[in-house]
Image (cartoon, rainbow, N blue to C red):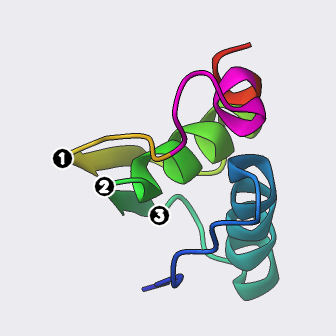
Amino acid sequence: MLSLEPRPDVPYQVDGQDLVAFVETLGLESPVVVGEGVGCVTALLAAIWQPHLARGLVLVAPRSQPPAASLPGRGLRE
């Protein structure tokens, strides 16, 4: 289980890279990745970048935190 405290100044992409590195460092084979709230974005990004990484995703109450007009919000959309 990996739990990250919210890091408002860190883009979702960094959290996604951290998740990929965590799974690879521990040598986890086909884990089911669970994301909750804004953590769903992290799980989705990791699964998109590394489709072989996880056997499945469980997304609980997905949402994104940055307003759509902000630079991080635009980066997440684009």
Disc on the earlier residue, 2 or 3 = 3
* Range of magenta residues: 66-74
Contact (CB < 8 A) between labels 1 and 2?
yes
Left or right: residue 25 versus residue 59 is right
Q: Amino acid at mark 3?
A: Pro
- The image shows residue 55, relative to residue 48, as above or below, that is below
Left or right: residue 38 versus residue 48 is left
Give me the residue at 47% from left, 64% from top: 31
Residue corresponding to mark 1: 61
Say the numbered circle drawn on residue 51: none
SS category of the residue bearing label 3? loop
Residue corresponding to mark 2: 37
In this view, which residue lies farthest toward the left? 61
Q: Amino acid at mark 2?
A: Gly
SS category of the residue bearing label 2? loop
SS category of the residue bearing label 1? loop
Residue 66 in percent (x, y) is at: 54, 42
- The image shows residue 63, relative to residue 35, as above or below, that is above
Quadrant of the frame with the N terminus = bottom left
- The image shows residue 39, relative to residue 25, as above or below, that is above
Give me the residue at 27% from left, 49% from top: 58
Residue 67 in magenta? yes
Residue corresponding to mark 3: 31
